[in-house]
């Protein structure tokens, strides 16, 4: 069963107006939306069949990311269930920075910028890892990068990627396989910080 398909103008969670679809995975749909007062947000909706385990892991991830250094992750605004679809819902702020995927299309990174970005990625991940929260979904569309030379890094999608690791969680999207550690694709080992280190490399 897929995540809900919503048209522009649809109201999610009683307060977020869908602007358009940003992306769709095997069992997760990501929407650009607007909340009051005219705040741009990102809404992720999960296949309703995933049930309570996904909602529980989203809430656990929210509790950890709330205590991470400000600016290192996108702020989680709400975790809950969309009454209209019954889907677990994760709402975050929308980053003003471009994603790494978008950035490299605009301009290749110099070796110094790439090294700075890698260092900043490690710094952004470290506080979450220290609290026992791996990301488990590092990829260019989940990393938002500030301008050079600082190349500050902001991470998105902690909650939704933790949900994939839960029993009955979302399936691995074939598009994401190239960024994932072997144990995330083939199983056979516990998922954790080491998985992030592989993906970051």
Image (cartoon, rainbow, N blue to C red):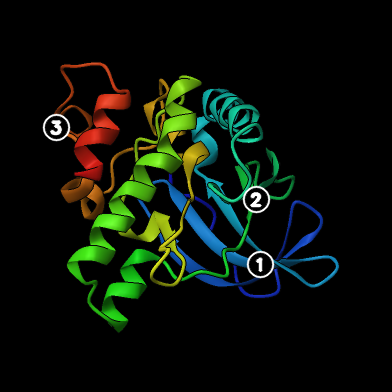
Residue 22 shown left or right of residue 11 in the figure? left
Residue 179 shown left or right of residue 155 in the figure? left
Q: Mark on residue 91?
A: 2
**Depicted 186 relative to depicted 110: above or below:** above
Residue appearing at x 29%, y 34% in the figure: 196
Pick whichever of labels 1 and 2 is earlier in the sequence: 1
Residue 158 shown left or right of residue 67 in the figure? left
Which residue is more in the foreground, 12 or 138? 138
Residue 40 on image: x %, y %: 68, 68
Could you tell me if the residues under marks 1 and 2 are in contact, i.e. CB atoms within 8 Å? Answer: yes
Q: CA distance from mark 1 to mark 2?
A: 9 Å
Residue appearing at x 24%, y 56% in the figure: 115
Q: Mark on residue 21?
A: none
Could you tell me if the residues under marks 1 and 3 are in contact, i.e. CB atoms within 8 Å? Answer: no
Pick whichever of labels 2 and 3 is earlier in the sequence: 2
Pick whichever of labels 1 and 3 is earlier in the sequence: 1
**Depicted 132 relative to depicted 92: above or below:** above
The image quadrant of residue 48 is: top right
Circle 3 Cα neighbour tier, 10 Å, few/some/many (<14 / 14–19 / ≥20): some
Q: Which residue is mark 3?
A: 182
Quarter of the image with the C terminus in it = top left
Circle 1 Cα neighbour tier, 10 Å, few/some/many (<14 / 14–19 / ≥20): many
Q: CA distance from mark 2 to mark 3?
A: 29 Å
The image quadrant of residue 16 is: bottom right
Q: CA distance from mark 1 to mark 3?
A: 34 Å
Residue 19 shown left or right of residue 133 in the figure? right
């Amino acid at each position: 069963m897929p995540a809900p398909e919503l048209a522009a103008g649809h109201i999610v969670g009683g307060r977020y107006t869908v602007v358009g679809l940003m992306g769709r995975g095997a069992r997760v749909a990501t929407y650009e939306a607007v909340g009051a007062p005219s705040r741009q947000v990102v809404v992720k909706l999960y296949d309703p069949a995933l049930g309570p385990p996904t909602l529980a892991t989203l809430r656990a991830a929210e509790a950890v990311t709330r205590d991470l250094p400000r600016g290192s992750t996108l702020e989680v605004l709400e975790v809950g269930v969309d009454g209209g679809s019954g889907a677990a819902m994760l709402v975050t702020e929308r980053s003003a920075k471009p994603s790494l995927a978008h950035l490299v299309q605009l301009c290749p990174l110099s070796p110094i910028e790439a090294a700075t970005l890698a260092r900043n990625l490690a710094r952004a991940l470290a506080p979450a890892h220290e609290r026992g929260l791996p990301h488990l979904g590092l990829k260019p569309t989940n990393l938002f990068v500030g301008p050079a030379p600082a190349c500050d890094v902001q991470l998105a999608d902690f909650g939704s990627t933790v949900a994939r690791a839960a029993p009955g969680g979302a399936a691995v999207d074939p598009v994401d396989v190239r960024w994932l550690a072997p144990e995330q694709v083939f199983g056979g080992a516990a998922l954790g910080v080491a998985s992030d280190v592989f993906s970051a490399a």
